[in-house]
Image (spheres, coloured by chain):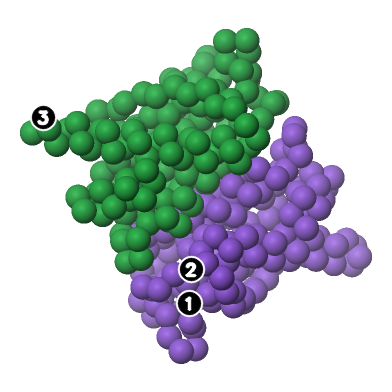
Chain colours: A purple, B green
């Protein structure tokens, strides 16, 4: 699905940027490695792994992190919105927070393996919520496939509407 | 060597940030995945894959890219210097440009597989130049090991001098 997603982005001349936290650059790298040679679909990304980077570089309001935690739908949406400001030429911005390993803001309702994704496309922000198992790299591989699937679905769905 | 490098960063309370181009977030992700649980060594990173991001987000002078190409020691050094401005709390900034696949600025002197790395540490910028073979992900794995080796050498060397 990743190759299919990259091909679709290339065919539609769509550029993507990623704002990552828990996935720490993995999503961005996979959209570079697995794209066809000569394709030009990736603008770049910001890895705001430490919450201080969300505040200093991305300009997320510290109160939002304090209220909802760094790994929350609310902060993920704000990262997506601000990511569009940072990567102005991006047609699609994907933001991701979550709990790859223990030691974050995990709770019974939000266990390790929880990921929040937001995708900005055509002026709207779409929310996704996953629970993934396996070791760290397995979770990231599954996450990449799910993001690719979601981008394909969004592009296809909006095509049908137009 | 990556785990040893992450352990050394953790022991010395050193924080690292990455400014990536060809490696597109892979280095950043590996320093997150393979660190010990609870370690806090990674601030984050910027993936300036498209040259326009080097200019708009990182503030690299477009003339520098025009003169030397986006994949050059000169641009890599400037990315390292500006990366230190973006990630002010970073004790170590690693920047990387190169030619992972065909379609960039490759020449006979600078074939596909060429990578330029700069590492900023204790107020100095160190240059590295590699030629790596294998498919895209193999090159990135070798590159990660070489960066880890270089960081270990830099930290150890500076320790002996003090």
Dot 3 falls on a residue whose secondary structure is: helix
Q: What chain letter is assigned to the residue under label 1?
A: A
Q: Disc 1 versus disc 3: distance between alpha carbons?
A: 43 Å
Sequence-wise, the earlier of marks 1 and 2 is 2
Q: Position of residue A128 (x, y in %)?
A: 65, 74
Residue receiving disc 3 = B161
Residue at 48% across / 52% down in the picture? B29
Q: Disc 1 versus disc 2: distance between alpha carbons?
A: 6 Å
Residue B51 occupies which quadrant of the picture? top right
Q: What chain letter is assigned to the residue under label 3?
A: B
Count residues near mark 2 (Cα–Cα under 10 Å), then give few for <14, some for 14-19, many for 20+. many
Which quadrant of the figure contains the C terminus of chain A?
Answer: bottom right
Give residue A100's mark.
2
Residue receiving disc 1 = A112
Q: Nearer the viewer, residue B42 or B86?
A: B42
* Residue A105 in sight: yes
Tell me: B35 left or right of B162.
Answer: right
Q: Position of residue A18 (x, y in %)?
A: 58, 54
Residue A44 occupies which quadrant of the picture? top right
CB atoms of marks 1 and 2 within 8 Å = yes
CB atoms of marks 1 and 3 within 8 Å = no
């Amino acid at each position: 699905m990743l190759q299919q997603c990259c091909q679709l982005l290339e065919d539609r001349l769509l550029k993507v940027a990623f704002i990552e936290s828990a996935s720490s650059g993995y999503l961005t790298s996979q959209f570079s490695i697995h794209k066809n040679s000569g394709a030009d679909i990736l603008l770049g990304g910001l890895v705001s792994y430490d919450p201080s980077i969300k505040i200093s570089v991305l300009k997320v309001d510290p109160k939002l992190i304090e209220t909802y935690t760094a790994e929350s739908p609310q902060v993920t949406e704000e990262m997506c919105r601000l990511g569009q400001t940072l990567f102005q030429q991006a047609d699609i911005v994907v933001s991701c927070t979550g709990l790859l390993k223990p030691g974050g803001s995990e709770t019974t309702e939000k266990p390790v393996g929880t990921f929040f994704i937001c995708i900005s496309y055509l002026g709207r922000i779409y929310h996704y919520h996953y629970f993934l198992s396996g070791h760290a790299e397995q979770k990231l591989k599954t996450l990449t496939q799910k993001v690719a699937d979601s981008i394909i679905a969004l592009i296809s769905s909006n095509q049908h509407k137009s």
